[in-house]
Amino acid sequence: MKKSIRILAAVLVGIVLCLCLASCGGGLNGEYESKVGSLGLIRKTVKFDGDNVTVKYLVSDLAVVTVEGTYTIEDDKITFNFSNKDGAEHKDAEEYLETLRGELSFEQGDGYVKIGGVTYTKVKK
């Protein structure tokens, strides 16, 4: 009887550990948007997919700039890395990426992320 209880306890501990590890990994997923300017005609979307990120600036739903890269989150900081296949920064998107440079503050909540003080709302599809 004691042996059965020990085996059951070990199995339960293993299951709990697996569930905890599964919930920790993978990074962010989903698309978030923020309106730029007082009229809200320009939108910035940030789409997370694992360790990859795609940033788009849209004017009236037409993409003006689209940049792909990667990101890392450590504690309450996020760092983006945007580069093309040659490793050089995207020169045509320089002014758009200025707000996503360096190590920025990061906060995630229910239906939003806050990056560098800017709140992005989760896009519902």
Image (cartoon, rainbow, N blue to C red):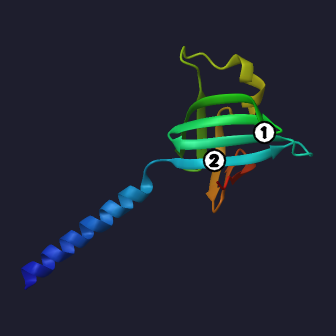
> Which label sits on residue 61?
1
- The percent coordinates of residue 11 (x first, y second) are 20, 70
Residue 100 visible? The answer is yes
The N terminus: image quadrant: bottom left
Q: Nearer the viewer, mark 2 or mark 1?
A: 1
The Cα atoms of the two marked residues, 2 and 1, are separated by 15 Å
Q: Secondary structure at mark 1?
A: loop
Above or below, comparing residue 73 to residue 95 in the picture = below
Q: Secondary structure at mark 2?
A: strand
> Which label sits on residue 31?
2
| Within-10-Å neighbours for mark 2: few <14, some 14–19, many 20+ | many
Q: Quadrant of residue 40?
A: top right
Q: Residue at x 9, y 83 (%)?
A: 2
Residue 104 vs residue 73: left or right? right
Q: Residue at x 20, y 75 (%)?
A: 9
Question: Quick one: which residue is furthest to the bottom in this view?
Answer: 1
> Which label sits on residue 3?
none
Given the image, on which type of amino acid does mark 1 rest?
A: Asp
Question: Quick one: which residue is furthest to the right in this view?
Answer: 39
